[in-house]
Each structure stands twice: as structure tokens, then as C-alpha cells.
Image (cartoon, rainbow, N blue to C red):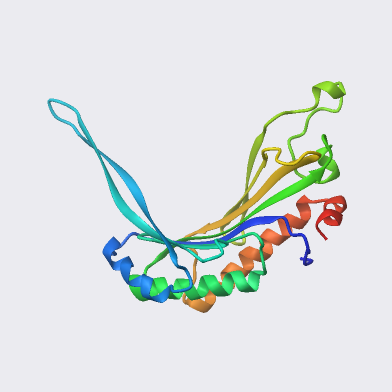
Amino acid sequence: MPHYKRAPITEALIDIRTEVSELRFEDLQAIRKSLSDYPKEETRTLDEFKFQLGTEVQAASQRRPWALLFRNQENNQVVQFRLDGFTFSRLEPYETWERLSSEARRLWGVYRQVAGKQKIARIAVRYINLFKLPGDKVEPEEYLNIFPQVPQTLPDELRNFGPFAMSLPMGQPDLKGVLVINERNALMAEPGIVPIVVDFDLYVDDPVVSGEDELWAFFQRLRERKNLYFEACITDKTRELIS
């Protein structure tokens, strides 16, 4: 994939979900000592609802801590350590896959030191792109090869669709995974700009990996597959915008 000087990536993330084990939230506290470069901390909670049947139906809710989230000083890198896994995100400005995966692998190692060796239930890469298309109104096919299609036989004044959201899951048989292409329009923040979000979410359940090297080699394959779809989904006119 070419290196685009004005890459439209607003967030890129690597996610690893593990099977829930005996890991406790208290165990995650030890992670802090290894994250001096991520000084901003938050606790994320999980709401649980319990129903009890009997002569009367009783319901109760409980909120319990589930994850620790850390941000770097610049607020452009975020890592979340959960009882069921780990997520690392790079916000804009995006740098390179090598930096993203290298930092994710380092932080995953920090998590493993506390959580121990757990079975990996799901892995994913996700890239969220914001394309800022010039004009007050655009024909999507000028910039994208995937979009909601409106019949050309309609009068022009009836073809200008409003807010939209599209989700297209596509099986990846060789990876034993699924790529979901999400597309929607964003709020118009700048005059003369039509913003469209194209979000690639590629995941694999129960990946067959026997060690760390195989795990990160698999992530490289996911990234290459995402790139294949990215290039297929944009036109040369879009490439001119982001080059």
C-alpha cells in the first residue's frame, strides 16, 4: 500500500480478547508501574444485571470495575487493560503500522506479565478513516467504490440523500475471519466539505497461533488484508486528495 502523506486515519487499533479467567481487577493495578509514559488513567466499569425468579420477580444491578485505561501525555495513544483482554489505539496523526504494532506488542507483554498466559479468543485490527471530500455536494462514485447507491433515474433534487449508515460484513475464508466495512457520513464541520467515514474492522475468532511470533505475524496478515480492501474502496480522485 502506498504511503499517503495526508492519510485519512483518525484511529487505528489492535485488539486481543482473551477467555475470562481468574484474573481480578486488583491484579491489574500492578500494571501502573510499567506505564510511566502513559500518565493519564481511568477506570472503566461494567454493569451487571441479575434477575431472581420466585413468588416475586426481583432484579438488581451492580457496577464493577472491569478495565484500566491509560493515555499518553499527548492524548494520541490509548491502551486499555481489561479482565478479558487488551486494546491499543493510535489516534491522529497516524504514524506507521510498524510503530503501531511495535508499541501494541510491548504493552501486550506488560499485560501478560500480570494476567499470565491466557487463551486468545479473538483478535482484531480496526482502521477508522475520515475522508473530507471537497464541495457542498458530491457524487460518491467519484471518490469511493463502495457507497449506498441511489438510482440514476431519479431527478437530481431527489437523489441527495441525508444522514446514512451502511454496514457490510464480508467473510475472509483463508483467515477464518470477517471484515466489516462500515460507512457513514459525519457531521459537517467545515464549509465546502462533505465528510464520510469508512471504517474497516477485521476480526478472527479463536485464531490458531502457537506463540507470540505467530500472533504478531497474524496481525501483519490482517493489516495487509485491510490494505487490500482500502485500496479497492477508493478511486484515483481520492488518492490525489490524500497523497
Q: Is residue 137 left or right of residue 93?
A: right
Label count reads 0
Q: Residue at x 67, y 31 (%)?
A: 163
Residue positioned 53% across, 75% down in the render: 214
Residue placed most toward the observer, 198 or 33: 33
Is residue 117 shown to the viewer in this render? no
Q: Nearer the viewer, residue 202 or 114?
A: 114
| In the rendered image, the vertical position of residue 158 relative to residue 185, given as above or below | above
Residue 96, percent from left and from top: 67, 69
Quarter of the picture holding the N terminus: bottom right
Quarter of the image where one finds residue 3 = bottom right
Q: Residue furthest left?
A: 55
**x and y percent of residue 20 in the render?**
33, 59
Query: Residue placed at 67% from the left, 33% from the top?
Result: 164
Which of the 4 image quadrants contains residue 218?
Answer: bottom right
Closer to the camera in the image, 93 or 168: 93
Q: Is residue 148 above or below residue 201?
A: above
* Residue 147 location (% of width, % of height): 74, 40
**Is residue 118 in view?**
yes
Please tell me which residue is depicted at 47% across the width and 68% down the height of the picture.
38
x%, y% of residue 13?
56, 60
Left or right, 120 with respect to 76, comes to left
**The C terminus appears in which quarter of the rendering?**
bottom right
Q: Quadrant of residue 86?
A: bottom left
Q: Residue 91 vs residue 54: left or right?
A: right
